[in-house]
Structures are given as C-alpha cells and as structure tokens.
C-alpha cells in the first residue's frame, strides 16, 4: 500500500497533465483503490466553465470506467501555475462523488508541499445525501 506522502507525490505528478488555460490553477489527484491500484486525475477546464471537470472526479471516473468500485484514499494537491504551496480541498461536487462510491471512513489527503492533512469524507461532508437516503 502507498503511504500518504507517496500518494501525494503521485498527485503532484498528475498536475503536469492539467489543462487549465483560464485559471492557471492546476490540480492533481491520486486515487488509491482497496486492491492497491492507483488512478490519477487532473483538472480539465473548458471555455464553457460548467463543462470543467476537477482532478478528483477525473480519477474517480477513470477508476469506475475500469471496473473499480472499492476505494481507500485520495490525495489532492494544487496551486496557481502548478505550484503546490497551500492545501487544496475538494469542492462540493467532488465530495458528493466521493460520497457516492466511498464509506464515511474514506480518507482524503491534502498536501501543501510541506505538511499533510488527513480527513475522512465523513469529516468533510457531514449529514450527506446518498443512496441510503433513497432507500429509507
């Protein structure tokens, strides 16, 4: 299994593929599957801003499209011009996607170039709406 720092380093590599000509804010993500497989993602912007997709969702959608459904953690890094110098937490839409595929103990790793912060999806999305609510 990958350590938090190893996962963050893979996310930093993913930043290199970011397509962010409008904001110059580059984000990379590394999604760890329970079987040890890692899927990367980067943000991909679009002139029609609502068509933009975040790094986290890119990684999840790649994994799901390859048949993966069990996840342990995701590392997310980002910054202006690809410089990782602050924490880059997932947006609300990405948190909802994580909630769709992961339990409350799913780990979110943030790295600012020096320090690592870890959260669970339960920490970042309390009282969430998901499949369980539809079945009540």
Image (cartoon, rainbow, N blue to C red):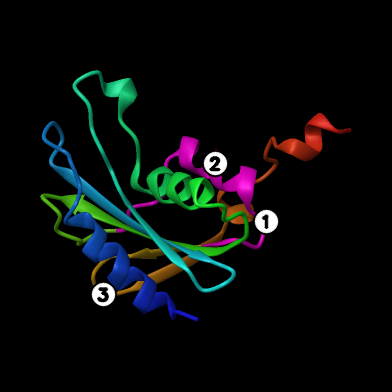
> Tag 1 or tag 3, which sits nearer the N-term?
1
**Image quarter of residue 103:** bottom right
Residue segment shown in magenta: 87-107
- Local packing at callout 3 (Cα closer than 10 Å; few below 14, some 14-19, many 20+) is few
Residue 6 x/y as whole percent: 35, 78
> Which mark identifies residue 63?
none
In three-dimensional space, the C-alpha distance between marks 3 and 2, rounded to whole angstroms, equals 28 Å
Residue linked to disc 2: 97
In magenta stretch: residue 106: yes
The residue carrying mark 3 is 114
* Residue farthest toward the top in the current orientation of the protein: 48
Residue at 25% across / 54% down in the picture? 78
Vertical placement of residue 75 versus 101, above or below = below
Q: Are marks 3 and 1 in contact (CB under 8 Å)?
A: no
Helix or strand or loop: what does disc 2 sit on? helix
Q: CA distance from mark 3 to mark 1?
A: 27 Å
Q: Which residue is mark 1?
A: 104
Say which label, 3 or 2, has the lower sequence index.
Answer: 2
Left or right: where 113 falls relative to 36: left
């Amino acid at each position: 299994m990958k350590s938090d720092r190893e996962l963050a380093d893979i996310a930093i590599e993913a930043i290199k593929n970011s397509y962010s000509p409008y904001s110059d804010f580059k984000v990379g993500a590394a999604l760890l599957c329970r079987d040890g497989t890692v899927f990367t993602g980067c943000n991909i912007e679009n002139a029609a801003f609502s068509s933009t997709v975040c790094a986290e969702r890119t990684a999840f959608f790649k994994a799901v499209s390859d048949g993966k459904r069990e996840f342990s953690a995701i590392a997310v890094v980002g910054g202006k011009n690809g410089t990782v110098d602050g924490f880059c937490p997932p947006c609300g839409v990405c948190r909802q996607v994580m909630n769709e595929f992961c339990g409350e103990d799913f780990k979110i790793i943030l790295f600012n170039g020096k320090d690592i912060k870890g959260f669970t999806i339960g920490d970042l999305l309390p009282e969430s709406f998901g499949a369980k609510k539809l079945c009540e």
